[in-house]
Image (spheres, rainbow, N blue to C red):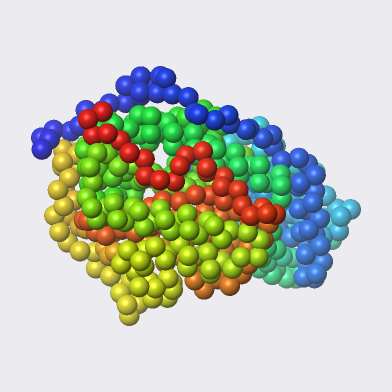
Amino acid sequence: MNTRATQAAGYRIGALLADFQPDFEFSAPLPLPLEEFEERLRKVRRQAVEAGHDAIIVHAGSVGWFHASNPWLRYLCDWMREGVLIIPTDSDKPLVLLSFFTQSVLLPPGGEPLLVDEIWQIGPIGREYADRPGDSVVKTAEKCAEVLARFGLAKAQMGKIGDRTSLTFWAALASLTPAAKYVEDSAILERLQKVRSPCEVEMFRAAAQLISIGTQAAYHVTKPGVTDHEIYAAFSCAQLAFGGETGDGYQIGINQFGTHCGKPYGHVVRPGDLINLYISNVTWRGYTAQTARMIAVGEITERQERVLAACTAGVKQAEKLIKPGALMRDINNAAFAPMIDAGLLTSPEARTMPYNWSPMPDGTARLIPQQYVPDADYEAQGRKLMHVYPATHGPHNPNLGHSVGMAGGQNSFNISSHNYDRLEEGMIFVMHTQWLEPLSAGCNIGDCYVVTKEGFENLSRHTPLDTHRITAGV
């Protein structure tokens, strides 16, 4: 066991990647055309008319590491930072964007807004920040109220779209415009996320290809003696070099069981390790893709091989059913059939399925088991692992997968036993089968798909689904 901190090995990442090249040609689509945003605006305004709204107000705040708190401004006008977008229902009135009310320093390009007539800089303000009185949220609401009055909307009905970061803004705006009526109507935009246009599919395809490039780079450097930091860095370096927008939306997990999923912490790859690359978000021009892959280093246990085989077979079996008109329930249940055959599960039903994050059967909180778990690399840093993760066996989630959308957005649907919706051409989703048994075996593996007229396209096909094998002596 190590008795001192593992020496940082980052200095060799250049050498590890020196001869790396992806084995396919990356297709890098240009930004979405103006016509795409014009069509979205047309649909939003039409839905506003149907709902009786005189305007739509869209709010996005700012969350950690300078990300917008939701994707709505990016979706509507390609604005990447926080803001309030005022969309009058009448087409002869212009769109107005209020922004620059946080301390984010992001500036276009990219992300110069489309379709917007005016952009107003509110300015971050406050005693501590600027030695000036005032509150940026209130200042934003004041400007919004001023614009509404200019458009004759001070007594109108408005649809409001936002998230948890919007609450203070909505309260301030309502107090400034007491005669107006505000109706929560995020469903207007949520309905537009289920089926994607051909131009959007190109964006998702590029994001999936970035994942494949990063995965191939991770495979390229993985061998006994390298660290999880280096594998994560290889993935990040490769996808970012080809145009990925961020490097913080995915996880890597390594231990001798295949049950770890997290951020790199200094684990040194050893024979017998199982590595999970859970790529839950790589972004191309605001659009994301998602996959999961497993890497086995040398010999692993018979139980681990059984779990890997069942999960891999599940994705492949479900994939055969993907086509327009297919029931999402049927696809979900097909994926869990191999896991039932392997004795891992007894039913594909979400309501009764065990899963890693589940509470107790009666709905009360579950106590995380306390047990010392040896981890040489963690202990070399002066820490000990004193609990068992995950707390219970099962997949991460009691379903097969979910829609994939824009960065910062929520899933518009889940592929689950209780989803009786049918697939439609243009739907994009990830199918990942998962099974974790604490201190024993684990797998998380899956691909990203788009439904086509005749069936499907596997967007992440450039890296095989099967477990990648590393010879222990390499």
> Percent position (x, y) of residue 45?
80, 59
Q: Position of residue 56 (x, y in %)?
A: 74, 60
Say which of 305 and 105 sits in front: 305
Question: Looking at the picture, how far across and down is residue 164, in whole percent?
Answer: 54, 61
- From the viewer's perspective, tell me whether residue 101 is left or right of residue 274: right
Q: Residue at x 64, y 42 (%)?
A: 203
Q: Is residue 82 above or below residue 171?
A: above
The answer to which image quadrant residue 53 occupies is bottom right
User: Based on the displayed image, in which of its 4 quarters is residue 7 positioned?
Assistant: top left
Horizontally, is 95 left or right of 445 in the view?
A: right
Q: Is 17 in front, or is 132?
A: 17
Q: Is residue 348 left or right of residue 208?
A: left
- Image location of residue 35, percent across then percent down: 80, 44
- Locate the C terminus by quadrant: top left
- Which quadrant would the N terminus be assigned to in this image? top left
47 left or right of 109 in image: right
Name the residue rendered at 58%, 58% in the picture.
322
**Is residue 285 among the parts visible in the rendering?**
yes
In the current view of this chain or complex, which residue is farthest to the right?
92
Q: Residue furthest bottom?
A: 362
The answer to whether one can see residue 116 in this image is no
The structure residue drawn at horizontal position 45% and vertical position 62%, both measured from the top left corner, is: 335
User: 399 or 56, which is in the foreground?
Assistant: 399
Front-lying residue, 317 or 262: 317
Count of marks, rendered view: 0
Relative to 193, residue 362 above or below:
below
Residue at figure coordinates x 38%, y 76% from the top left: 352
